[in-house]
Image (cartoon, grey):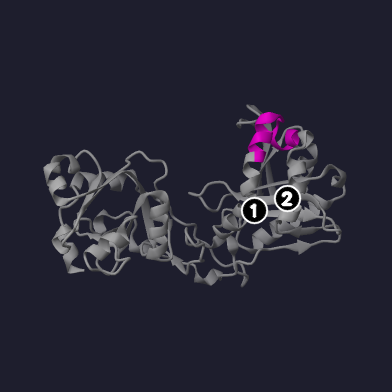
Amino acid sequence: MDIYKTLKGFISKEAINHICFRYYNKYNPLAVKPLNKTPMWFKQMTCDCCFTPLDSIGRHNRYYLCKIQEFEKLTPRQYQFNYDYYNNPNEIRINYDTSPYSYNGFVYCYKIDQLSPRSYSTWFCSRQCALNAAKKMNALAFYYDEEEQSVAFITPHIVEINRAIHESDYTPLLMMDWGEHNWFQKLSDYKDLSLYGFDTSYPTFSTRLCNVVKPSVRLLNGYKRLVLDPDFQKDFWGSNGAAISNHINNSLPNFMNHVDVDFGRRLMIEWFITNKNEDFIGFIHLTCMSNAFPYKWVVEFGLVKEYRGKKIMKTVLRGILNWAKNNGCDKIYAISEEHNHPAHALFNNLPFNVTENRTHMSDQFGGFRPMRNYIVNL
């Protein structure tokens, strides 16, 4: 790795400071204690590429992905001829020259999009997964290399670059001018997650009245009929019409793909509800409100009209909330239309500490209107 010390000075101090302030993130995972020996799904982080549960999170496996706005692969002569352009101190530019180590070397020139909303921080289980994400997002993945005591970065072209300089494929490029004092996260931010276990089996259960199951293609048409029903749309979204139906029809082709991915990433859990003949009669899901705040969850549900008023959702909702509590969730949020009185009764009669707030809210379908929100403390 000594050859990387030649990188000293290849990125300006102005660019370093801009990255530090632009992408600084004070994310601090909530301190949690195990409720019991059951693996706690809600308190576990996973690799953002392959969804493998992580033993721990911290500076050693946290990456910051910055969107590439411009990329050019130049010959050394082209680079020298336009040197001032590719070293503009007012832009975040990174230039990596492989020509000193390769007979036919190139200069890889990157300009980072300073205003990209897609730049974010996350965790990966390996450099291979970081590279896969960098390729998918067309981004540079920065992290702190504990062994070299330097910030390192992985580019979508890292394998090509390393072969040119005779290094192993996934060896990250070090930035020797950008040390620990410039990095976003301290070693003390490490958090051990191994006590939460690695159980990722999809939770299901049955009651005397119904089954709560993982969604399947066989049941998808029943789900489609329910969410396209105008009366259901009015209760669920506060409105009905072409805009909502188009939104549903556009999302359904990818529905099943998202079930496993969102479950693996701890972003959402979707269940279908069936009767004892295994016919679709409803759904319920828990959704993470924001990727940046991964412990804030919302519950939403719906039942086919013929099965309402039979205490099915009362039983299912309590079963789901008990499972969430046993798996590390402390609080669930819910929103209900003002006219949906059965939903109000359902939340106010839960065997938990429930806070109801009357408010006005707005969304893309129902506009500004009176609603009720609930906080269920588990």
Q: Which mark is residue 124?
A: none
Residue in the picture at 14% in, 43% down: 83
The magenta stretch spans residue 242? yes
User: In this orientation, does residue 180 appear?
Assistant: yes
User: In this orientation, does residue 351 appear?
Assistant: no
Q: Quadrant of the C terminus?
A: bottom right
The magenta stretch spans residue 194? no
Q: What residue type is labelled 2?
A: Leu
Whether residue 132 sits left or right of residue 257 in the image: it is: left
Residue in the picture at 39% in, 50% down: 26
Q: How crowded is mark 2: few (under 14 residues within 10 Å), some or many (20 or more)?
A: some
Q: Where is residue 68 in the image (x, y as percent from the top left)?
A: 33, 46
Q: What residue type is labelled 1?
A: Met
Whether residue 85 sits left or right of residue 250 in the image: it is: left
Q: Position of residue 179 (x, y in %)?
A: 23, 58
Main SS class of the magenta portion in the image: helix
Q: Where is residue 238 in the image (x, y as percent from the top left)?
A: 70, 32
Q: Which mark is residue 220?
A: 2
Residue span colored magenta: 233-249
Residue denoted by label 1: 256
Asked whether disc 2 touches disc 1, contact meaning CB atoms under 8 Å apart, the reply is yes
